[in-house]
Image: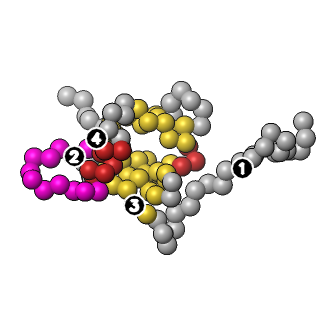
Amino acid sequence: MAASHIFKVLFVNQGKVYEVYARKVSHGNMFGFIEVEELVFGERSTVVVDPAEERIKAEFAGVKRSYLPMHSVLRIDEVRKQGVSKIMTYEGANIAQFPVPMYSTPQSEPPGGKK
């Protein structure tokens, strides 16, 4: 019987840190993006509901595959057991995104000077 892989993916989106679990993670076909497929959420067999996990589950409802910008991914771990997916704020934490050069207008110079 083949081992079932589960990956914990931490990434930054709109000022929050997302922790999700997925069965497949790869570099994908789009340059600069990490492909995350088959998101895994906890099955509810009891009356107790975790509002944090329900929020992230609702946000990714109907999503078959997600493409995360490589610079927003903080960490990818292969884990033995699935944990609880959640969205966290990172105020006061030591988490920072890689700096990304952004050019606001077409007249802005690319790195290395003019063409």
In this view, which residue lies farthest toward the right? 114
At label 4, the amino acid type is Val
Assign the C terminus to one quadrant of the image. top right
Query: What is the total number of numbered labels drawn onto the structure image?
Result: 4
- Residue marked by disc 4: 40
At label 3, the amino acid type is Met
- Residue marked by disc 2: 42
Quarter assignment of residue 87: bottom left
- Give the percent coordinates (x, y) of residue 104: 75, 47
Give the residue displayed 26% in from the left and 50% down from the top: 54
Between discs 2 and 3, the one toward the N terminus: 2
Identify the secondary structure beneath mark 4.
strand
At label 2, the amino acid type is Gly
Between marks 2 and 3, how big is the CA–CA gap?
A: 18 Å
- Give the percent coordinates (x, y) of residue 9: 41, 47
Between marks 1 and 3, how big is the CA–CA gap?
A: 26 Å
Which stretch appears magenta?
41-52
